[in-house]
Image (cartoon, rainbow, N blue to C red):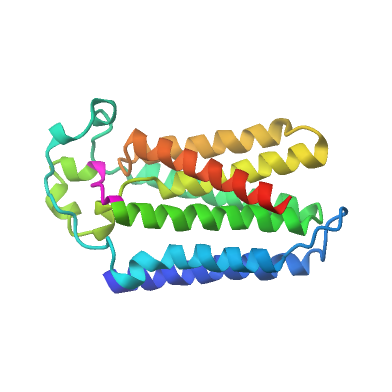
Amino acid sequence: MLRDRHKARRKWAILLAGTVLAAPAGLVAQVPDSIPAVTLRDAVSVGVASVLLVTPGATGWGTGLPNCAPCNRADVPGFDRWAIGQFNSGWQLASNVGILALAGFVTVDLALRRDGARTVAALEAGLWAAGLTEVIKAAVGRPRPVLYTVDAVAAAENTGNGRSFPSGHTSVAFAFATTYWLARKDLDGKPGVLGWLAFGVAAGVGVSRVAAAKHFPSDVLAGAVLGTASGVVVYAIKF
């Protein structure tokens, strides 16, 4: 099961990287200000981010079983302790739908503007957020909230439950939202309702991760900061 999960993560990394490099070429060769949709720098950036994304799974770093089940609630800071609870599949589904809807909308909306460079920037920022998240998760190895509940023993059989910090859903969602906000501000002179709505959806993804008992609030806040930084840096370098 663990091997299958790692293979699936590698497939997603390859798919996203391929989308960054190939999809915009079918939409537009360059934007009105003559910025190429995909540059050599983009290719290198995508390659590095992809390596970060697959390294923990490929090397086995930080992918072992959780080191406690049940874990001691006293070890959880007070501002996070209230989020300890049993897994909620409904909120899990909501977070999955939210991030897919946001990523899909941002990509399609920018593509329909015939703006290959900014479409690539959004996808690239999402890939960097995902890659950095995987590395930090492996390095920190924080147990998920469910490991502090009566379901801890069963939950400990899932290696992913030992990697809570930061929230990957949140980091990727904020990377897309940030890039989209910046793109709309440049193209339209202001981010507009849709630009701010993208941040609202990203925040909703983070809230749903806490409600699903998949993450602590601090995991989500760290993911939001990481995703926002990924979006800002990628956009600033490209534009």
Residue 44 is left or right of residue 168, and the answer is right
Q: Height in image: 39 above or below 92?
A: below
Which SS type dominates the magenta stretch?
loop
- Residue 72 in the image, given as x and y percentages of width and height: 12, 38
Residue 134 is left or right of residue 143, and the answer is right
- Residue 112 in the image, given as x and y percentages of width and height: 78, 54
Is residue 163 visible to us here?
A: yes
> Residue 127, located in which quarter of the rendered image?
bottom right
Residue drawn at 65 percent across, 45 percent down: 179
Foreground residue, 110 or 122? 122
Point out the image quarter for the N terminus: bottom left
Is residue 208 visible to us here?
A: no
Residue 22 is left or right of residue 217, and the answer is right
Q: Is residue 141 magenta?
A: yes
Foreground residue, 215 or 100? 215
> Residue 119, located in which quarter of the rendered image?
bottom right
Q: Which residues are magenta?
A: 140-145
Q: Is residue 19 magenta?
A: no
In this view, the residue farthest toward the top is: 78
Foreground residue, 134 or 26? 134
Residue drawn at 15 percent across, 47 percent down: 152
- Residue 184 in the image, given as x and y percentages of width and height: 74, 40
- Residue 28 in the image, given as x and y percentages of width and height: 81, 64
